[in-house]
Image (tube, coloured by chain):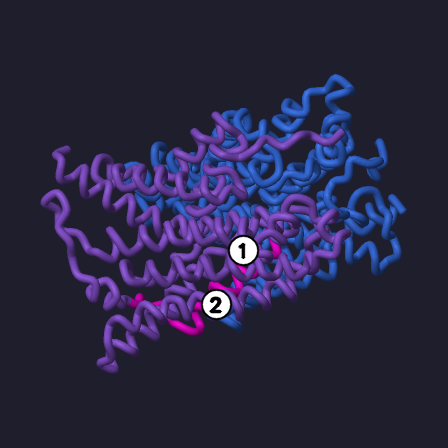
Amino acid sequence: MKTVTTFLAIIVAIGLVVLPLYFPWTQVILTLALAKGLAVLGIIVLLQAGQVSFGHALFFAVSAYAAAYLGQAFAGGELLTMIVVGVAASLVAGLLVGLFVVRYRYIFFGMLNLAFSMILFSVLEKFYHLTGGSDGMQVARPLVLGMEFEREGFETLLFYGTFVIAAVAGLAVHRFLVSPVGNMMKTIKTNETRLEYLGVSPRSVLLTGYVLSAGLCGIGGVLMAVAQGIVTPEYAWWIRSGELVFIAILGGAGSVWGAFVGSIVYEFVRTFASAFAGDVWQMVLGVFLLIIILFAPSGLVGLWNRVTGRGESSTSGQSVPAKPQPAASKEPSA
Amino acid sequence: MNMQLVGLAIFDGIAYAALVFLVAVGLTLVFGVLRILNVAHGSFYAIGAYITASVGGAVAAGGYSPFLAFPLMLIAACLVGIVLGVTIEKFLLRRVYDAEEALQLLVTFAVFMILEDVQRLVWGTQPYFESSALQALGNIEVLGIFYTKFQLIFLPVVAITVLIGLRLFLRRTLSGKLILAVTEDREGAASIGIDADRVYLLTFVIGTALAAFGGALASATTSVVPGMGADMIVLSFAVAATAGLGQIEGAAIAALLIGLGRSFAVYLMPEMEVLMPYLIMLLVLLWRPQGLFGVAQSRKI
């Protein structure tokens, strides 16, 4: 079973690497999808604890604007510095916001996140002289390790760079989820009181996960900003946050796989829907989301597991049970 | 800041609070009973506004009395409540009452996305402006300030009527008592023969109609543009959470608090205008996590 999954992972990864060579138009879409997938990974970390943030676009925007400022301050800037500074900024923001929001659960957790992100959104939009208002800020093509690249070369580099980052982040998050702290995160969802009885502070566990998820959104934000060449307040809008949660559910909230499968499918559906059904692409996505929730609540990954008859594989099979019951937890302990 | 500006800020705040209250009270009522935070609530507000503005525009262009705008608002609200409310509750929400909160939120988010495009398909992207109801009532002078009667008198009266009406409905009528019973304990209510499904449906339709009614009233004072639903939903979330989710009287006070906070920000620090509701909500929730009037829930072990 394990080998089949690994084998499949390798096949899909090779497919992703090779696809842009034969279909150059997919390169930009895939870069954007992977960047968004990194942010979705952050959402999935929080979903393990049963918490939905409707404001994680906040961290996406923080790092994207950090990269934009850096680029303007150093006339172009350096990609690696941008990533480091962007992620650092989102980690700090994640810690500050996290200290407040980890005291709340469920609706209030989601709402407070929403409030923080809307505050950033309004600041970005209103303080025109600092942030360029709703026009946003340009992000010039940065140097990579001190070297200058043409547009095409840079895009190729960015794609493969994003791919490597996504693979590393995916593995790291997978390790985190099966680690003791990762399992404690799942316990917050199934029975938080038990966690307290064990002498563990659920708040600090959730804070760890929260900062991690903010950092993941941060990486995604920088890459998105560089790939698009512009940052706008829309990065922090609550619809963006909703989109991230949407992709997580679409892919399957139980596994690292779900984030990238979901974001790639989402990005392609969105591209085709806006090309062929320009006026109604949101409607197409909405219907798509409804179908997934009603008929395949464990997402595309869960659907795949069901089709291939591997229904109860670790966490992805039954990722959407009823509301957390105080009764026995279904999660395996390791 | 002189007295006139203070007066203006207070009037603005009250008029605004009355509108926000109508939308937020629907949201909080639905949450109290169905335990679902309805993201599509803002769309009902927008659709109510669009219907009133477009039909009202046609009525006014036809040379009929501008006072027809008032019954039109009620009709628009009932229409949205019955058509959209019944469809969404029966065919979508009913299937996810037992699902995780994340999924319930996302179902309403999907409905929101679909309704956004429906609005664009039906009404296009150009703004609608139809203020015959506002003009029909004329102006009034208070403390040396001229203000429209519609905003200063009519809107607050409507809001207070709805508040009292809802309270009487819930406490005095059979349907209202059934709603309260199901809110308190769904299983217990069902076991003594209350049809919980019907109660859910009724509540959702009322909530939807209230949002649409808020939109219908708002259409007389501002132009109806795409995206107004998205803004309103976040705002009414803020009001409902500040009050404590499920708190009807509390929502009125929270709406006043946020409405006044916002209108004073407009005159004192214009950049802060949009920030104000969220800042107020954050401060309140940090101090009282369950909201101003919410009751802390006991934890189950």
For label 1, the SS is helix
Chain letter of disc 2?
Answer: B
| In-front residue for pair B244/A171 | B244
**Taking B13 as reference, is B278 left or right?**
right
Specify whether residue A302 is painted magenta: no
Tell me the kind of residue under disc 2.
Val
Chain letter of disc 1?
Answer: A
In the picture, which quadrant includes the C terminus of chain B? top right
Magenta span: chief secondary structure? helix
- The letter of the blue chain is A
- Classify 10 Å Cα crowding around label 1: few (below 14), some (14-19), many (20 and above): some
Which residue does the numbered mark 2 point to in the structure image?
B80
- The letter of the purple chain is B
Q: Residue at x 51, y 47 (%)?
A: B28
- Please provide the residue range marked out in magenta: B105-128
Tell me the kind of residue under disc 1.
Val
Q: Is label 2 on the same chain as label 1?
A: no
Q: Residue at x 33, y 42 (%)?
A: B259
Which residue does the numbered mark 1 point to in the structure image?
A28
Q: Is residue A80 visible?
A: no
- Which residue extends farthest left? B144
Q: Is residue B33 visible?
A: yes
| In-front residue for pair B263/A151 | B263
Q: Residue at x 53, y 70 (%)?
A: B83
Corner quadrant of residue A66: top left
For label 2, the SS is helix
Q: Residue at x 54, y 43 (%)?
A: B246
Q: Cα distance, mark 2 to mark 1? A: 42 Å
